[in-house]
Image (cartoon, helix red, strand yellow):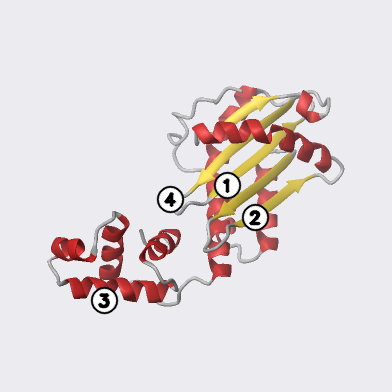
Amino acid sequence: MDVQDTRRFYHHGPPPSRLGNLADSMLAARTLGELDAALRRLRDAFGLSYCRYEARFPGQGRSREMLLVAGAPADEWRFAEAMDEALDRVREHCRQSICPLLWPDADLAGGAAGMLNVAIPLASRSGDFALLQGCWAHDPPMGEAQAREQLPELSWTALHLHQSVRLLMLKEAGAPGERLTAREIECLQWIAQGKTSWEVAQILEVTEHTVIFHANNAMRKLGVNARAAAVQRAMSLGYL
């Protein structure tokens, strides 16, 4: 499977208004049902025959997972089977690259001619990872050049879907009500780099007691009991 060239991905200017509206509706999703509907709209916007989004989010104690599927009921089992059979090779690609993957494979389609598969890895600095997989199984078949033209916009839209899922997961996990102050964020930024309270105090030209005070306040607001957990939580919420 060859990874398609992604160097030109984000040099096409702003997305068409239809995709802007789709992205806005994704970010406005507040329930699992609305996310399901958003994935179906993504499938239809790009003419995919089947589309699947799966994600894993790190958490305290155990990770949380999310799976969304959009496909025609009559063929869903066949496409799902094809995605499962390709999963090992897709995961191997994701260990080495964050670029989208595009490959034809009629065998994986259960004999359907012209099936073209796509996989788009998605991740954030908070440690979550997701994968958007889909396929075009049309007659006449979708050409690779035509599919490659859609990859920039498909990747852009997939990022918004992932962000909407992240926001929902954070909401379910109970995001803190009090916002961190600028000084609390600054202290966590240095703590994230492995600095001690004394070292942070020297950098910020404050007392060590002041740094401890701000770090403890941040932990309280974030609902955690350790600095490392506070850093991870602050990253997942977009503070760092």
**Where is the N terminus found, in terms of image quarters?**
top right
Type of amino acid at the residue the image marks with label 2: Met
First in residue order: circle 2 vs circle 3: 2
Give me the disc on residue 210. Answer: none
First in residue order: circle 4 vs circle 1: 4
Q: Do the CB atoms of the residues marked 1 and 2 lie less than 8 Å apart?
A: yes
Point out residue 101 in the picture as x, y percentages from the top left corner.
58, 31
Q: Do the CB atoms of the residues marked 4 and 1 lie less than 8 Å apart?
A: no
Crowding at mark 1 (Cα within 10 Å: few <14, some 14-19, many 20+): many
Point out residue 95 in the picture as x, y percentages from the top left corner.
53, 35
Q: Is residue 101 depicted above or below 182 in this figure?
A: above
Point out residue 239 in the picture as x, y percentages from the top left corner.
37, 62
Q: Do the CB atoms of the residues marked 2 and 3 lie less than 8 Å apart?
A: no
Q: Residue at x 57, y 29 (%)?
A: 149
Q: Which residue is mark 3?
A: 213
First in residue order: circle 1 vs circle 3: 1
Q: Residue at x 58, y 52 (%)?
A: 56
Q: Secondary structure at mark 4?
A: loop
Q: Would residue 170 be found to the left or right of residue 188 on screen?
A: right
User: Spatial distance from mark 3 to mark 4, Cα to Cα?
Assistant: 26 Å
Q: Would residue 62 be found to the left or right of residue 229 on screen?
A: right
Q: Secondary structure at mark 2?
A: strand
Question: Is 183 or 148 nearer to us in this picture?
Answer: 183
Q: Residue at x 29, y 60 (%)?
A: 191
Q: Quadrant of residue 11?
A: top left
First in residue order: circle 1 vs circle 2: 2
Q: Secondary structure at mark 1?
A: strand
Q: Which residue is mark 1?
A: 130
Q: Do the CB atoms of the residues marked 3 and 4 lie less than 8 Å apart?
A: no
